[in-house]
Amino acid sequence: MTRKVPDKPTIDGLESTWDARWENDGTYHFPAGADRADVFAIDTPPPTVSGSLHMGHVFGYAQADVIARYQRMQGKAVFYPMGWDDNGLPTERRVQAFYGVSCDPSLQYEETFEPPVEPHDPARPISRRNFVELCHILTEKDEKVFEDLFRILGLSVDWRHLYTTISATTQRISQRAFLRNLARGEAYAQEAPVLWDTDFQTAVAQAELEDRERPGAYYRIAFHRDNGERVFIETTRPELICSCVALVAHPDDARYQALFGSTVRTPLFDVEVPVMAHELADPDKGSGIAMICTFGDTTDVTWWRELDLPTRAVIGRDGRYRETTPEWITSPAGRQVYAELSGTFARQAHKAMVSYLSESGDLDGEPRPITHAVKFYERGERPLEIVTSRQWYIRNGGRDGELRQALVERGEELEWVPDYMRVRYRHWVDGLAGDWLISRQRFFGVPVPVWYPVDLSGVPDHAHPLLPEEADLPVDPSSDTPGGYVPDQRGQPGGFVGDMDIMDTWATSSLSPLIAARWGSDDGLFERVYPMDLRPQGHEIIRTWLFSTVVRAHLEFGALPWHHTTINGWILDPDRKKMSKSKGNVITPLEPFEAYGADAVRYWAASARPGADTAFDEGQMKIGRRLAIKILNASRFVLGFAEDVDSTAVWTPLDKAMIGRMAAVVDSATRAFEAYDYAKALEAIEGAFWSWTDDYLELVKSRAYGHGEVAGSAHAALQLSLSVFLRLFAPFLPYVTEEVWSWWRDGSVHRAAWPTVAELEHAASDSTVLDLTAQVLSHVRRTKSEAKVSMRTPVSTLVVSDTPERLALVRSAQSDLVEAAGARDIEYVEGSFLIEATIAADDSG
RNA sequence: GGGCCCUUAGCUCAGGGGUAGAGCGCUUCCCUGACGCGGAAGAAGUCAGAGGUUCGAAUCCUCUAGGGCCCACCA
């Protein structure tokens, strides 16, 4: 084909040109008829669509894309979908803030409701359906922005395979998987104490917890024995004395032996509680004897369960003390104290209790200030409370040693890059404290697909749920009617009610490989791409996304959902802190794209070792940009000489040596890629490229400007090596390599074959000639540089001393060497390796 | 309290038993017909510290000190 080499090539603007072309040509389409053996399927992380993409996304997705592109060039049918995680609490929060609304499920749907242009202040309550509609509107806007950014980044995604976690298709898959879990007994509902966020009014799962250090204080408080003796406990939460159900000490603790089996009375409330023994009680903490409340912390839950204690809950789901005075408080004085607490939040109750205890003399001494870890929902601002409620769970080994062991083994079976990340998985599974709580008392998510019959007295029968047929999915039990009922029977005696809960977003995103593979709706696709080959993701979500995906795949198919996982690191700011919005150190990805170009940003991302946390480094992007520009110009040079010359025309020793070097680079880059070490591959390719331009190009330049067989060999070698370099760089720098490829080749470089040693062998030889010649050239340059003269200054004498064999090799490249060095001749001396160059005294030519 | 990772040139990072590496930055120089978003060259490190294994340790082992992260029952 005719060359179309521009006079002044530029890398600016390549992104929009080639993104459009790739889209138009279907360059990254997953081939319809691919054999399973030829498929490489990627389970892309669906980013949360609740704000903006940051450099961390760019970093991780670029690394995965480099691998995708490599596999595609290796001839794999790459299945590379994209997903948007748009359901769940993050979206609800964003919608509340963006429009100034709140969801009130008791309100009627407003047909004519228009999305507010300005956020309402104070927030305007709207119906659940209106609220969900706003969620859809906003996520669509956000998703467009996400797609635009990922396209600029050059992700070789097949955008026809885009999914969202709130779509009807996804809901169908999510509900289907849930119903199957339910049928097999892997999903179940249970009335139990759960960690509860009183602001969001929803249950929270173990994986979403985080500890935060908070100031607190130990209060030493007297409980009373019937004989008048006082028993001192220490607590940070005196406001929970009214929900105290027992005291507990270690069975071996000598101080409390006499108390076990007896009862004491709580201060102020005068409620009789037993003193019990349990090995979880720590003799060294506080006074060694603790009060058990329902519920102050998760240890309370353990004691409550194992010691079979009653439930005396006082804090409601809204975080306030219940209005009615509890029946277990019987003394008039105690009932009066409680009346003062009712309706307050824990904080206020805490203050009030401290002053009452102080007045009554039950508070001993001064409070002792401490800092302690308090459990928070990772997105919440108030400490979690523990309330008893009915919730849905999926078994994950947290309560079942056999399942846990099986899941640990799945983790061992998985190939991790880097390998040490597997430890985090094992530790998480080993540390599970209970099954996976999947229900949320929220609105924008996949509904739990269950109804309950209502008996004649109007009470729902949770023991006998009504389930939909798989064919009818997805369903929304809050608006759809179960089989055998009519809509009017909702909430009526003898009728039905819908489960109001939705599933947590992880309950759906744990099915991402099934969603992307269209499980249940496209069997042909599913069979070709599942289980997938690769799960790329960040290490902070090993405990959530990775683990939950393994759980679902294990339960549904008894196998891993993918063979490999690559774990990418985090982006740190220059102070080595994780970049995050709250720290205000976030850099918007568009700025680096505009300043350096997408190839340069990708270069930065691909330079980081797999799994390594990496500093945001504009310096690295500048280098990437320089590399891209160099590729453009070196290509222009190579393609400026002759029409295509067959690689069989390579014959001079120097040219063959260079091709020999190319073969070595192809080999090491391929090995690195096979181990998912794209960074090592890039390093090898880049190093070879710079020595190619610095040494080889300079050595053959003047020969290449000439004619005949010697020039032809140079042209052929240059073209062959350029073709190899473009293909080697293509996964990293898709834009500049595609641009150059288009100057002289048909089709996309991204569908070209990854270079092989085999295609170079016929034109390759040992690279010693090039190594030696480059050393001589380097010496000459040093001499000129030290003499502070131009590189064009002629060399009057050039002496090379070495063994006869090696001298013969230098001699074989003599004409190239004298041209590049500016020497008239080379003097060869047998002896130990030595190079001597003398600059002409007065010969400026 | 337990665990994982990191500590190598001013900076960002490779390397992983045999004479310390790259790029950036810095210094000096060049203006050559692919490239000024050029090109050539140079200076620069007790490989965090201490022990140990070894003929030989930046590399393997132990401990210590910093940094980061994950986990843990909030009395």
Image (cartoon, coloured by chain):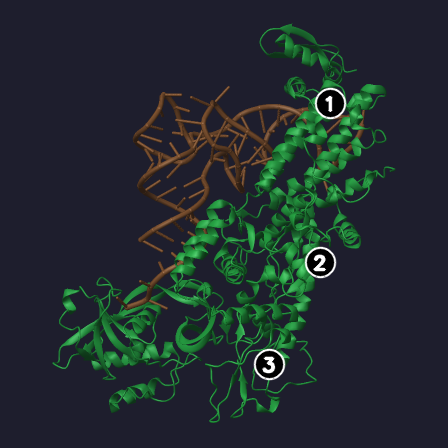
Chain colours: A green, B brown
Q: Chain of mark 1?
A: A
The single residue placed furthest to the left in the displayed view is A227
Q: Residue at x 24, y 89 (%)?
A: A331
Q: CA distance from mark 3 to mark 1?
A: 72 Å
What residue would you read off at disc 2? A159
Residue A645: image x %, image y %? 82, 28
- The label number, if any, that marks residue A540 in the structure image: none
Mark found first going from the N terminus, 2 or 1:
2
Residues B44 and A129: in front is A129
Examine the image and state in which quarter residue A776 appears.
top right
Q: Which residue is mark 3?
A: A128
Disc 2 residue type (three-letter): Trp
**Residue A460 sits above or below residue A559 on the image:** below
Q: Residue furthest right?
A: A2
Say which residue label 1 marks.
Answer: A655
Is residue A591 found left or right of A199 in the rendered image? right
Q: What crowding class fits label 2: few (fewer than 14 Cα within 10 Å), some (14-19), or many (20 or more)?
A: some
Mark 2 and mark 3: span between their CA atoms? 31 Å
In the picture, the quarter occupied by the C terminus of chain A is: top right
Amino acid on which disc 1 is placed: Asp
Amino acid type of the residue tagged 3 in the rendering:
Arg
